[in-house]
Image: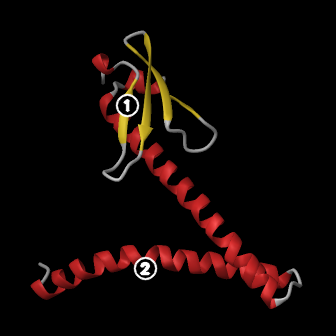
Amino acid sequence: MVSAAFSGLLALAGPLVLILIPIVAFAALWSGVYFGARKAKRSKVKSSLFATLAAPILFFVLADFAIQCDISFYVRRELEKSLSPEDFSSLKGHGMICPVVYSYVRDGKPEGALGVGGIRGAKIYYENEKNRP
């Protein structure tokens, strides 16, 4: 059983961790870009400027990729719960990496599902809302 003091500490640490994770990830990306530029024999000033410009772009690209993969895993998991094994075996993702658009055959009819992320979590939109799994 968790003591009241420890659960209070966990409640306080939760938001702090949510703030620290992106800061540490950004700092790690910035450091990697900076030291990569230094290794390529650039000056400290040029390396610092390059890292300051490239790290945010890289951070947002990687964050967008992580969000899309999270949505993709969510859609696939929810479709696996709601479709029969035969229907789930026909599931096909449309996209190279982490697809958010899926098609499948349900009761002999082609159907589709689209995963969309948002502030309140991911939502699945079905091609035919009346025939939802």
Q: Position of residue 93 (x, y in %)?
A: 54, 32
Pick the front one: 11 or 133: 11
Q: Is residue 91 visible?
A: no
Residue that lies at the very extreme toward the right in this rendered image: 41
Q: Position of residue 78 (x, y in %)?
A: 34, 38
**Which of the 4 quarters of the picture holds residue 133?**
top left
Q: Amino acid at mark 1?
A: Tyr
**Which of the 4 quarters of the picture holds residue 73?**
top left
Q: Position of residue 43 (x, y in %)?
A: 85, 88
Precedes in sequence: disc 2 or disc 1 = 2
Q: Is residue 11 visible?
A: yes
The residue labelled by disc 1 is 125
Mark 1, secondary structure of its residue:
strand
Q: Amino acid at mark 2?
A: Leu
- 93, above or below 69, in the image: above
Say whether residue 37 is left or right of residue 52. right
Q: Which quadrant is the N terminus positioned in? A: bottom left
| Real-space CA distance between mark 2 and mark 1, rounded to the nearest whole angstrom | 33 Å
